[in-house]
Image (tube, grey):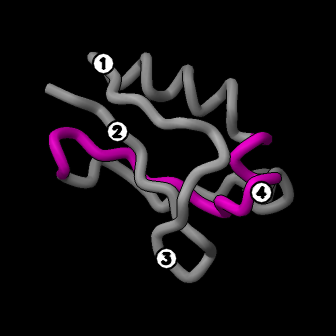
Amino acid sequence: MAWTWRFEKADGTETEPAVTPEEFPTQGDAESWIGEVWKDLLEGGTEQVTLLEDGSTVYGPMSLSAEEAAG
């Protein structure tokens, strides 16, 4: 199984991430990575992310904006 992130603008269109993405062996690894780089992604133009397992959506889109996450 491969866990990956899809990087998107607020309207759902895909965008090129500011940080080179990886494939992760576990969901926890993918979530830890996004927790470490979300600010860099946001500053680079990614507004939301969706977690995928072997190409199928697990959850998302999830906003990277701290204001939205707190609301």
Element type at mark 2: strand
- Numbered range of the magenta stretch: 39-55
Kind of residue at badge 2: Thr
Specify which label sits upstream in the sequence, 2 or 3.
2
| Magenta-span inclusion, residue 52 | yes
Mark 1 crowd level (few <14, some 14–19, many ≥20, 10 Å Cα): few
Which residue position is annotated with label 1? 26
Q: Mark 2 = which residue?
A: 4
Judging from the image, what secondary structure is the residue with disc 3 in?
loop
Whether pointer 2 and pointer 3 mark residues with C-beta atoms closer than 8 Å, the reply is no
- Indicate the amino acid at tag 3: Gly
Residue 12's tag is: 3
Q: Secondary structure at mark 1?
A: loop
Residue bearing mark 4: 65
Q: Nearer the viewer, residue 22 or 47?
A: 22
Which residue is rendered at x = 65% and y = 28% of the image? 35
Instruction: State the CA–CA distance, disc 2 to disc 4.
Output: 20 Å
Nearer the camera: disc 2 or disc 4: 2
- Whichever of labels 1 and 3 marks the residue nearer the N terminus, that label is 3
Mark 1 or mark 4: name the one nearer the start of the chain.
Answer: 1
Q: Quadrant of residue 28?
A: top left
